[in-house]
Image (cartoon, helix red, strand yellow):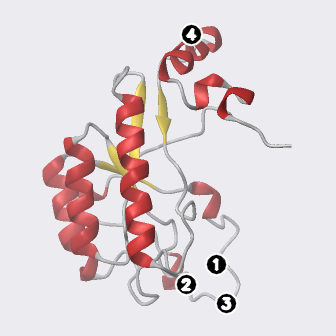
Amino acid sequence: DSKSFEDGQRGGFDPKARISAQDVDNVTAEVLFGGVLTFKTADRPLRFALMQAYNDWLADFCSEAPDRLIGVAEIPTWDVELATSESKRARDKGLKGVLIPAIPNLEGPWSSPAYMNYTNAWWDPLGDALEDMELEFAFPTQTIHLAGEPEGLPNEANNTPNRNRASWRVASIRSAAS
C-alpha cells in the first residue's frame, strides 16, 4: 500500500498550504531545515548532490514567503572549501543559514575529521565566509548531550563554537512542533 504526497499534510510540500497552517496556528514564521544525517551515505559526491538538490528545493519552497519560511541549508562539513562554496550558493538562492553538526567529532561520511573540533583553525575559512555573507548557522540540538560528554568522547569533542567572532553566532532555533 504505497502513499503519495497528497496523503500527507499539504504544508509539507506546498508553501501556500504551509503559510495557511501558520495562520491557523498563529505562527509568525518558521525556520525550516533537514537534519545532519538526512542524507546518510558513505558516497560523499552523492551526498553532496543530494544536499544541493535539497537546498534548491528548500530555496524554491521558501521563496513563496521568505519572511515567514526561513530556510537553513545543508552543507558538506567534511570539506571546508566545498562547505563555503555551498553556503554562498544557498545564500544566493535566498536561504538564511546553514546546518552543522552539534558535535563535529562523531566521524562518519557526513562529518569533518574527528580531530577537527570547532575550536580548530581548520574551520576559520568557513566561519569567516559565514560572517562575510551574514549567514547564521544552526546546530541540530537533538544531538547535544546536555548531561555531559557523550560516552567515549573526550571533553574537547563536545566543544560547541566558543569563538570571539561574530561569524560563530548560534542561531537559537526551535522546532515549530515544540
Q: CA distance from mark 2 to mark 4?
A: 44 Å
Q: Which mark is residue 23?
A: 4
Q: Which mark is residue 152?
A: 3
Query: Which residue is situated farthest in the left direction here?
Result: 132
Q: Residues within 10 Å of mark 3 (few under 14, many from 20)?
A: few
Left or right, 139 with reference to 78: right
Q: Is residue 73 visible?
A: no
Question: Mark 1 belongs to which amino acid?
Answer: Glu
Secondary structure beneath dot 4 equals helix
Report x, y in % for residue 79: 30, 77
Secondary structure beneath dot 2 equals helix
Residue at the image position 56 percent from the left and 40 percent from the top: 174
Question: Mark 2 belongs to which amino acid?
Answer: Asn
Q: Which mark is residue 141?
A: none
Residue at the image position 42 percent from the left and 90 percent from the top: 115
Which picture quadrant has residue 35?
Answer: bottom right
Q: Nearer the viewer, residue 41 or 69?
A: 41
Residue at mark 1: 149
Q: Is residue 33 visible?
A: yes
Would you say the residues marked 1 and 2 are in contact, meaning their CB atoms lie under 8 Å apart?
Answer: yes
Secondary structure beneath dot 1 equals loop
Label 1 vs 4, first from the N-terminus: 4
Report x, y in % for residue 116: 38, 84
Quadrant (top left/top right/bottom left/bottom right) for the C terminus:
top right
* Front of the two marks 4 and 3: 4
Label 2 vs 4, first from the N-terminus: 4
